[in-house]
Image (cartoon, rainbow, N blue to C red):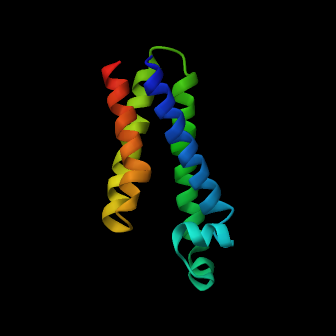
Amino acid sequence: MNVVAIVLIVLVALTHGWILVLEMLLWRTPTGMRAFGTTPEQAATTATLAANQGLYNGILAAGLAWSLMAPEPTTFAFRVFFLGAVVVAGIYGAITVSPRIVVVQALPAALGLAAVLLS
């Protein structure tokens, strides 16, 4: 496996792990509200939805971590699937929530996917 691909997979997994923490644990805190641009009222109203989103981000992070540890020959399929899922989620988030999501989520995952496919 290409070192660049591994580094990008780790970066994407850590990003999604951090998003899990923000959405599930820090949503109503100043850190969470600053990250997502919400008010205390919005954070209180949407906390359950955010926790649900955080769980999905955690699943993506876990899948990417597993793709680095899984026995061959399944690693390639896991990497392609989970990086592809992050790209799709990032594009959808950019369209529906904020264009910034393309840079934070979709771009690193797309670069990782390209590195995996080229290795």
Q: Is any part of residue 85 visible from this angle?
A: no
Residue at the (52%, 60%) spot, across then down: 53
> Residue 101 sits in which quadrant?
bottom left
Q: Which of the pair 34/71 is nearer the observer?
A: 34
Residue at the (50%, 29%) spot, across then down: 7
Give how far across and how far down residue 58 sits, in percent. 58, 48
Give how far across and how far down residue 115 sits, in percent. 36, 27
Relative horizontal placement of residue 35, taking residue 26 as reference (left or right): left
Residue at the (54%, 16%) spot, across then down: 71
Give how far across and how far down residue 76 sits, in percent. 41, 22
Numbered marks: total: 0
> Residue 79 sits in which quadrant?
top left
Look at the image and tell me in which quarter the C terminus lies: top left
Give how far across and how far down residue 110 sits, in percent. 34, 39
Relative horizontal placement of residue 37, taking residue 97 as reference (left or right): right
Q: Is residue 118 above or below residue 113?
A: above
> Residue 92 sits in which quadrant?
bottom left
Q: In this view, does 71 lie above or below 62?
A: above
Q: Is any part of residue 59 visible from this angle?
A: yes
Give the residue furthest to the bottom: 41
Residue at the (45%, 16%) spot, across then down: 1
